[in-house]
Every structure is written in C-alpha cells, then in structure tokens.
Image (spheres, rainbow, N blue to C red):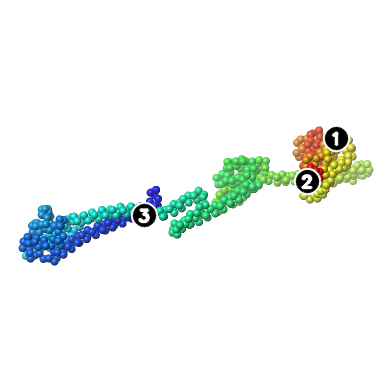
Amino acid sequence: MFRSIQWKLVTMFLLLVVAVIIVVGTFLSKSIVNFYQKDFKAQMDSVFEHVDFEPDAVNAQQLEEKLKIYIGRLGIDSYRNYFILNGLGGVIASSNLEMADTLENSENIIAAINGRKGTEVRKDRPYMDYAVPIVKDGQTQYIIYIRDEKTELKEITAELFSIILQALLFGLVISVVLGFFLSSTITTPIASLTQRAEKLAMGQFDQEIKVKSDDEIGKLTASFNYMSSELKRTLDEIATEKNKIETILLHMTDGVMAFNTEGNVIHANPASKKMLGIEDIESLTFDELFKEINLEVSLEQLLYLENWKTLEKEINYNGRHLKAFFATSKIEKEKAGGVVVVLQDVTEQQKLDMARREFVANVSHELRTPLTTIKSYAETLLAGALEDPETAENFLRVINNESDRMTRLVKDLLILSKLDHKQTQWNKTHFNLKDLIEEVLQKLMLNARERGHELSFSPTGEIPEIFADRDRIEQVLKNILSNAIKYTPEGGKIVVYAGRINNEVYIKIKDNGIGIPKEDIPRIFERFYRVDKARSREQGGTGLGLAIAKEIITAHGGTISIDSEQDKGTEVVIRLPLEKKELNVNGT
Ligand code: ADP
C-alpha cells in the first residue's frame, strides 16, 4: 500500500512542507536575531552618540545620576543592566549589584579600557554589551557599560520555534489530507486503467473506460480504449481465420499433419488419422510416426538442409497406398518453424489403374485366342485342306464360330464401353414384365431343350408394369438364363420366379447346375472373371455377361445378386424399383 503512487505523492507533499517550514523557520529566526542585535546597537548609539557624559564625569555618582535620565531610552530592565566601571574595569555602581561580582572583562570593556568605544555585538556570546569610556587627560577614568543577557531574544526564539513547530504539524496534517485527495484525482483513473488492463489480459474486451479529462491521463485512457478495440478486432480476425482453416482441415479429404521443430505434432486432421489408422497421432513424434509406417525421412534434413523444396514420398501402410508431401513452414525468411505433411490417398486410383491394365490384357488375350484359331485353320486350308471338302467345311465352320465369338465379344465390349461412358441411350417405356419373361423363355426354349433342361416360369401374384428399357432388360434376362442353361449339366431344372414385394419387382432365376465356389462369388460380376475359363469358352461365353447385366440393372436403380452352392445350383435375383406412377396405377 505504501508503495502506491498515492502514498508517494503524499510523502512528496510532506517532504515539501517540512522543507519549506525549515527554510522559513531558519530564515525567520536568523532575521529576528539580526534585528534584535541591530536594534540594541541602534538604541545604544542613539544615546551615547548624542549625549556627552564627559563634563559630568567628576565622580561616579554624578555619572550614574546622568545615566539614570536615559534609563528608558536605553531599555534598562532586569535583563539589561548598566554598570559604571573604573578605568581598569572594576565595578563602581550598577543597576544590578549581584552581577557586579561575576562581571568578566569582555572585548568591549577591554576596548573601553584602552580608550575606545566597545560597540561590537557578537552572535556567539550569550550576551550583548556596549562600553563607552569617559576619558580625562588621555586616560580612561570611567566606563559606562551596558550589558543585555539576551534573555528576551531567547524567549522570542523559543516562542518562534514553538510557532514553527505548530505550523509544521498543521502543515503536515493539511498536506496529508490535501495530498491524499489531490493525488486521488491522478490515481483513480490510473487504478481504473489498471483494472481494465487486467480484464483485457483475461480476454474481456467489452467495456470502455469513460474519458473524463483532456489531460495526459485522459489521452492515455483514450489511447487505451483504442488499443483494446484494435486488439479485439485483430483477435476476432485471427479467430475467424483460425476457424476457417480448422473447418477446411476438418473436412478436407487429404490428410494434413503439422510438426514443430522438435518433432511434436501441432495438428493432425481427421483425414490423416483415418488414412493411417492411428487415432492418437498426437502422442507420437515425427520420428516415431514415420518409423511406425516404415518411411525413411529425417526431420533434421527437412528443416535444415532441404527446407526450400517439397519432398514427395510413397507410403504403403494400413492397406492403403498413400502419397506424402513434406514441406517446411517458415516463421521468418530463413528460419524453419516446422514441417507440414500432406497425405493423399491414391489407393482407389491405383486400383483403377490396375483394373484398366488388367482389362486391356484381358481384351487382348480374349481376341488373340479366336484370332489364333482362325489364322491356323485358314493356313491349314490354304496349305491344301481345301482339297478335302468335308474337312474344309469343318474348318470353315470353326472359323465362322470363332468370328461369331469375336463379334459377340466386340459387341459386348461396345455395350460396356457405352455404359461406362454414359453414352447409352435409354429407351424407357412402360411394359409388361411377365410378357417379356415369357418371350425370353420362348426364345431360349429350343436351346434348353437341346440340353434336356426343364425350363419353367412361376409368377407369383400380379406383376405390375415396369418403366424401363425393354431391350436392355431382355438382354439381362437372356444373359442370366443362358448362363443357367450353359452351366447346368444335361437334364437340369431351371425355374424363373417373378413377383412383387412392396415397391419392387423381383425376378429369380434358379438352376440346379454346377454352382459357383464360395470364394469366386464376390468377384463374379467383374469383367472377364470366370470360374472355369475353358468351360466358359467352350460354351461360347465372353466373361462379360454378368458385368453387363449388373451395369444395366444398376443404371435402372435396381440390384442384382448371386447366391450359389457348388454342385447344387445357382440363384440369381434381380430387383427393380417401381416408379411412383406405377405404384398409383396398381393401387398400393
Ligand atoms: P460367361 O460368358 O463366361 O458366361 P458371365 O459373366 O455370364 O460370363 O459369367 C461369369 C462366370 O460366372 C461364368 O464363367 C461362370 O463361371 C459363372 N456363372 C455364371 N452363371 C452361372 C450359373 N448359373 N451357374 C454356374 N456358374 C455360373
């Protein structure tokens, strides 16, 4: 408390008062002493310079008589006495005989003994005196000696001292009170500024301090208000920026991690955690993290050697293929503040690349086989087989079959390519699904009979009209049904079910053929995927039938699934959604 500005100001006031009173007091007491001494001398001079005592100096008594006349003017009283001394300083008469015994020869008396007036008043003596010689025939006969004991002066000085002391006390009290009030006009605004600064430090920006005066403190308050509003604005801006960046980092698909120069994680966004499959990336350091994912990269090298360029690395981790870009973030021009790592998941892209390459390889392979056959048969024919009409016919039939297969393959590929590039023109109409199924069955009946299959249709309930591309749906049904016929040993049983469940129609094609091994089922819809290549080819298959079926059904918003057990049979289920309109027409 005593270290506050208010107390410092009060102390200053007090010291000022003490100093002033000491100076004034000293000055006053000095002037009083001076005045008193001058007054004594003047009083003495006024008598002894104008009155001549010498003619009366016949004897001491006469001299005393004359002196008594001037008692009033000389101010003789109990503290100021007169003495009549002989030429050697011995007392002859006095207004105070008690003192006569103890009277010593002062300098003034000695001067008078020597015939001179002793008028010197000395401050360091406890008394003031004045000695006038009465000279006769060049000899000092008598000396009139006045001596003042300075008692009055002492009393006055003591009185003055007590007055000064009182004034000092009074002045001190006034200066404490005044100092306290006056200084509070300075310290109150400072205190409120301090309070406000503390609140500012705690993040409260809302209050403004009123500017009450136009002085330095008023200006300080105004600048303080301006500073706090600027600070608030800047902080708001920073917060908005931070929010923006955080939102971007939160929702972006690329992984972003930031490390400081010590290698600690400053930030890791959700995408990076997901890509690496590490939830608590924050608990790892740069080195630990990249050691865990088996990537050789050195933080020091990035920070101090190669901090001007970005480094690109590939990571295979957590079943994903990632691309990592390393870049240093800078705080100053040349000083690295940390490392930012951006992760890109290129797994899908790689899969696609692989699939594309595989597809090209498959197509080439599928085309090469019939081409090789055609070429070798043609060569054999040219080499002379033409001579034998029966062999020639056989060979030509094979060539014809193979070119048919190639045509089918190219046709299927074209269909797929169009579906892929969304170039297919969908010719959607409302048609009766039951009629379509019966039509397809009719078309494949001969084929089925040739193999001794029993082919039947079992509709359940009313099958509503659907809105779809009739030719494409027919193609799907043909693909699935011919698969059932192809992959069922002679004399099999193939049943087609169809019906409606809620707002869907379903078609189920069930056979009791060779079935598909469990492990092949998940890949059966892939292009060129076949369980038994030789058998498929022998049956004239291209390996694209199911892929095409799936594309067409998906494009109609439906689903196709396959369930199968080896040597028992296969069941393909197609579901197609009914449009709202159809739902209304059919009353549900
Ligand atoms: P493919 O032209 O070879 O028939 P698909 O795409 O139509 O090509 O069929 C892919 C593979 O799925 C076939 O090679 C066959 O191994 C298997 N498959 C399809 N349908 C059946 C079925 N009903 N029974 C057994 N296997 C089947």
The amino acid type found where label 2 is placed reads: Lys
Residue 583's x, y, as percent?
A: 79, 44
Q: Position of residue 77 (x, y in %)?
A: 15, 57
Mark 2, residues whose alpha carbon is within 10 Å: few (<14), some, or many (≥20)?
Answer: few
Residue type at numbered disc 3: Leu
- Amino acid type of the residue tagged 1 in the rendering: Lys
Mark 2 vs mark 3: which is more N-terminal? 3
The residue nearer to you, when weighing 25 against 575, is: 25
Q: Is residue 534 visible?
A: no
- Distance from the alpha carbon under mark 1 to that under mark 3: 119 Å
Task: Name the one closer to the observer, 521 or 6.
Answer: 6
Marks 1 and 3 close (CB-CB < 8 Å): no
Left/right of residue 94 with respect to residue 424 in the rendered view: left
Residue at the disc numbered 2: 580
Q: Which residue is mark 1?
A: 493
In this view, the residue in front, 550 or 460, is 460
Q: Residues within 10 Å of mark 1 (few under 14, many from 20)?
A: many
Q: Residue, x 50% and y 54% (percent of image)?
A: 208
**Secondary-structure class at tag 1:** strand
Q: How far, Cα to Cα, is label 2 from label 1?
A: 36 Å
Instruction: Report which quarter residue 160 is drawn in.
Output: bottom left
> Residue 41: which quarter of the image?
bottom left
Residue 442 disc label: none
Dot 2 falls on a residue whose secondary structure is helix
Q: Disc 3 marks which residue?
A: 178
Q: Residues within 10 Å of mark 3 (few under 14, many from 20)?
A: some
Which of the 4 image quarters holds residue 93? bottom left
Residue at image location 16% in from the left, 64% down from the top: 45
